[in-house]
Image (cartoon, rainbow, N blue to C red):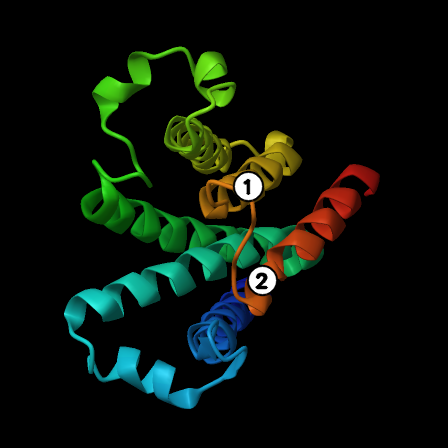
Amino acid sequence: HPVDGWSARMGFLALCVTALNLGSYLALYTAYSKANKKLEPDLLLEVLFLRKGLDHTLVELNKAISLAGLTNLCLAPLVGSMRHSLLWHAMLLLWTHSAYSAYKYYGTPHIPRIETWQTNPWHDFQSSDSKVKLSALKKLALVLGSMGQLLLAFSSLFATTILASVGHFYTIELDYKLNLKVRPYAFLPFPLAAIAVGCYLVF
């Protein structure tokens, strides 16, 4: 059937886009040295061949997977014929990222323990203690990330989904001085998100 053939082709193209997306983050993000400010292929080989152990490989893959999922989410409204497939791939990537991050980071400054959420977040943001302020920021990041994933089910709130997801990425990566210190290729989702939200609202 022609419609089935078209859907199959779009599904395959979406899979290719997702694979290229993830591959680009491995090549241009994972292989980038913050210290030397340049691409170093050995950094990628360390991850792929577990040269620094399984834990290091999983941590780096988790970062690439999260960025690929976020980028897929931003690309979806720009390619209408592949939109649903790209969204589905984005959900799978982001769910994987969320599950691993919860396992790896719960109880650390990245994901504060649940009992610490009883404090007043507004007071925490105003605290002079940088650790308390950073903890409040990470809680905000987790709320935004959860909102982004939950809102994926509602196409009418697509722009809000992208903004919440990008907001999560931005806030989770801020340090205690509120500096965003990520490798250059990780800035890609920001302009994509702006374009995606703009197109979604206009068209």
Q: Is residue 164 left or right of residue 30?
A: right
Q: State which tag comes first along the sequence, 2 or 1.
A: 2
Q: Which residue is mark 1?
A: 178
Residue drawn at the location 45% of the way across and 43% of the way down: 172
The residue under label 2 is which amino acid type?
A: Val
The residue under label 1 is which amino acid type?
A: Leu
Rendered position, 2 above or below 158: below
Residue drawn at the location 55% of the way across and 41% of the way down: 178
Q: Secondary structure beneath disc 1?
A: loop
Q: Is residue 179 left or right of residue 106?
A: right
Q: Which residue is mark 2?
A: 3
Q: Are marks 2 and 1 in contact (CB under 8 Å)?
A: no
Q: CA distance from mark 2 to mark 1?
A: 50 Å
Which residue ends up furthest to the front in the rendered image? 128
Q: Nearer the viewer, residue 198 or 131?
A: 131
Q: Position of residue 33 (x, y in %)?
A: 46, 77
Q: Secondary structure beneath disc 2?
A: helix
